Image (cartoon, rainbow, N blue to C red):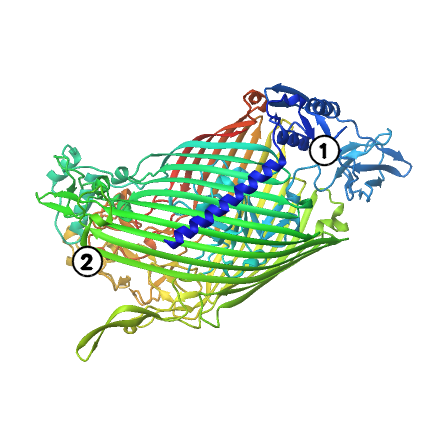
Amino acid sequence: MGKPCLLRGRVLSLLALMFTIFLYQQAKAGGGEGNQDPNTSKIRLNKKTLSLGSLFSAVEAQTSVRFAYDASELNVNEPIALPAKNIELKDLLSEISKQSGASFEWSKNVVTVIPPKKSPEPETKLVVTETGVSGKVVDKGGQPIEGAVIVIKGTGKGTTTDAGGNFKIDARPGDVLEISSVGYKKAEVRVTNATSISVVLNELKIALNDVVVVGYGTQKKTNLTGAVGVVKMDDMETRPLTNSGQALQGTVSGVYALQASGKPGDDGAVIDIRGVGTFGDNTPLILIDGFPGNMTDVNPVDIASISVLKDAASSSIYGSRAANGVILITTKRGSSGTMHVNYNGYFGSQSPTRLPHVLNSVQYTTLYNEASVNSGGSVVYADTTIQKYAAHNNVMFPDIDYFDVYYGKASMQNHRLSITGGSDNINYAFMLGHLDQNGVLVGTNYKKSDFRSNIDAYFLKNKRLRISGKLAGNLGVKNEPTDLWDAEWYATLAPIHPLKNDAGQWVSVNGERNYYGEIKEGSTALTKRYNFSGQAEAEYKILDGLSAQVTYGYNVTATNTNAFHANVTLYNQSGTTTDLASDLTVTNETDVQTMLTSLLKYNRSFGKHDIGLLGGYSEEEFTYDWQSGYRANFVNNTQRVLDLGDASTQTNNAGSYDLGLRSYFGRVNYAFAGKYLFEANVRRDGSSRFAAGHQWGTFPSFSGGWVMSKENFLKNIGWLNLLKVRASWGQLGNQNINTYYNGSDLLTSGQNYSLGGTLYSGVAITTMTNKQLTWETAQQLDFGVDMMLANSFDVTADFFDKRTKNLLLIQPIPLTMAESAPYANAGEVQNKGIEAAVTYRTQFSNGIKFRVTVNASHIVNRITKMNVAEQLTSPKAIKVGAAINSFYGYKMNGIYQISDFTWQNNSDPTIPYASRNYTLKPGVVSSSDFTAQPGDIKYKDLNGDGTVDMNHDREILGSQFPKLTYGVNLNVSWKGFDLGAFVQGVQGIQGYTYYEIATQFSGFANMGSWWLGRWTPENPSNTLPRLTLDGVRNDIHSSFYVENASYLRMKNIELGYSISPKALSRAGISSLRIYGNIQNAFTITKFKGFDPEQTVDQTRAEAFPQVRVMTAGVNLNF
């Protein structure tokens, strides 16, 4: 009871603190004007000149007035000179009209801003001197632009402006000058004899000065020396994403995000950053607002940005958990100004993207007879029986496609409400959401409610003290069949098995369970998952450029699962019954994590020198415990309480662990003249996972960059906005071995010993520990280039070579030791590749805006060294020279044909096929596993000894990791309409389809319809073997079951329309967008499995299919 009470106290204290700060600051900031006429409201302004947008925000913060305008038509950055610091609203609007030309229309408390009518831009004129042309280049505020490039169009002649924006160039009347500068729209002017005026360049909204979130801070994109990918969350807000990990699919080069399931509540993505560098857990470190977390616990709509740290330079500040890359998630925050309310919601319909095509009852029974005869048996299903299945007018002779029974369409809905805003002293963001998703598999459903609040409060003069509070929580409730694996397996059941008899009772065929009936009678598992997290942070600016920051975070996840098997009576065809007893398993898990981080940051500029220093300390604690209880034979199927079960069947289990991590880290950033960049990081980690003497590791990195486009020899190239080259090297660690691993041997109680003829209970060492075990260490080298061309193209490309040493792997030990095998530092793996991303954006004269982003990655994964014996087992192996967990087995070399054999009477062709005794001809390869017959799979003889055997003739058959991943994101908008399309795909990947319907008559399972093309004497196929029931000759792990799993998928397509703000102003609405969306619209692939995305570790049918989602929704702002 102590832990829940302590947790409740901490959460309530943090919540109280946050709202106390909020209420205090709101009272301090003041409020609206009550029922007073807004026109006469006094507006308090603290500057003599403010931008138009800042004035609107000031008015909205001090009154109930709201402004509605089209940001694309109004220059909100236009400066307005103010006659007084305290002015009535009507006088302020009048002054704005005089200076900007804008006008206003009132509707209650909503003011619609009508932009000034556009007039032709004045002709830019230059003075023609005896030596050419002179002029001045300035921005819209009249400030000179240094380094602007002036080129005579059609020639190679050019010059640049000085510090005052002045230039001279040898040009003559009639020449056209092209003027460009980084961050501004290009201008063209024709030389005349007119008087001189300044050339005005309009600012171009481009990504050069974008701020990117990095470890423990932010950096300008131009100053980055590491490889950092950024996900634009604006494109994701209206996609039907139920898990934030799905936002990484196909959006960042070097990142392979695989959605392994479409099951509600478990549909997150498996994420690999720059390949797989371990035999264990390859999950990257995920930080949500600086705190380690799970992508399940942050709503995609709440995310402001996602940064993916891919190389060692950007990741090493996180040390021992960064070997697999780092994902930084920053949630939305409030900002000074008016309160904004947003609602985003949609309703949708789901269906499986694809389900296998299987045999009907007549096909199944016919092919089963054929397989039985081929195996030396007799016909099982008589013609009269097959005719009954064909008529299917009797419930006991059905024709059931069990995929249609278990899978179907399902509804879903998602709603999100957010409130953001603030004043000079406080910023706030509150978000609330609810997801209700039914599953496409019978008996599955998921509901999730969540909230998030972020508050930033500022104190002291010049806001020297910032105190921030963050609180988030979610409750997920998941329903699914108790044995979900069984539900997915029974969907492959043969079509001849009935569900019910004539009396409507659940039927069992040949003693087999009727799992559909069990689900309908109540065999379901209910899982409730609670997650709460809180953070308190204080930052104090000690001096200009010097600040100290302390952050404390607390996260708890509690999971309760009630898995119930209902009492069901099944009626057998023989007339007998089978009673399935009820039972209940209750499991409770609690996972608590705390983190304390202290930072000291220093950032200053001295002339052309920019320096940044960071030092920090962090410690984290992890506690996990679980308990489970079991009882059987309940009195009914409705009261699912352990105490109501048979006490004699009771069993209990429990377990726990505690882990700790302590770290010291630092970083140095230096830039000279904005051209020469350098960064160094170091982190020292101590982990409780390892034995004494091996607990500490040090992880350094170095990186540098050269902004070549700022050099004099490149300044005159007008279309080259940015050219930066960079390089980095660093080391990273990985401590992600088994959570229960201990630095000492484990003793287990309940062991019995016989001493002197008497049996005594004691303890024994049952788990052996390797006390020399140490960190996995990844060393990575990266070379990259960043470019911006013609203010329209962004290009980023990287080459990397990541080598991971001391791979952690369980080392086999002799069975006679009777202990669990220990981990060992077993080998090395290399991930080498190239990645690139290109973005093109433009706006046409007819108003169409266009943006397309293409990213692609090519990665080669290879085990380079093994310190222990290779693990050459099928269907996967660990082998030097191959990728991790490559598919391994025999190589199919066609099908044995009749011409490969001789038979009695000198191969008399008149002897019926079924009566022949076949013998392989000399020189034809045989198999040590079976006696080959015509129609069997022929395997490749690798060593050339004439016989295929498992010791000499198995080889690597393919990899479950793709050679190429890519994504294409397209956005087009025009006059309120917007269209988005996103394509994602992989090439050079193999999938393993050794599961029920792909093999021959596996248990009571059906078979894929492609087996209709199997080998027969009349159809001598060279790709599909003959049918048998022995499960030996043609069901061996081989390349027959390894398929090309490459695919191209239309991941998302969306059409939206935004209603004009002017039309909405009367309703007090600032914007309204209506949209329709299709997720997983179509897939192009040759893969026969459930889904090409579900190839990792899929060797059976228990893969929950992906879902196609069609939604319609609204995005509404007040």
Number of marks in the image? 2
Residue 974, quarter of the rendered image = top right
**Name of the residue lying farthest toward the right:** 130
Q: Give the quarter of the figure containing the C terminus.
A: top right
- Residue 138 image point, x, y percent: 78, 37
* Residue 753 vertical placement versus 1037 (above, below): below
Q: Which mark is residue 609?
A: none
* Residue 746 vertical placement versus 76 (above, below): below
* Residue hosting label 1: 50
Mark 2 is surrounded, within 10 Å at the Cα level, by few (under 14), some (14 to 19) or many (20 or more) other residues, namely: some
* Residue 1059 vertical placement versus 1017 (above, below): above
> Residue sitting at 53 percent across and 51 percent down?
290
- Asked if residue 567 shows in the view, the reply is yes
Closest to the camera, between mark 2 and mark 1, is: 1
Left or right: residue 147 versus residue 487 is right
User: Foreground: 378 or 15?
Assistant: 15
Give the secondary structure at mark 2.
loop
- Residue 416 image point, x, y percent: 47, 35
* Residue hosting label 2: 918
- Asked if residue 1000 shows in the view, the reply is no
User: Foreground: 684 or 200?
Assistant: 684
Give the secondary structure at mark 1.
strand
Left or right: residue 748 versus residue 530 is left
Q: Amino acid at mark 2?
A: Tyr
The span from disc 2 to disc 1 (Cα, nearest Å) is: 96 Å
User: Foreground: 521 or 950?
Assistant: 521
Q: Amino acid at mark 1?
A: Leu
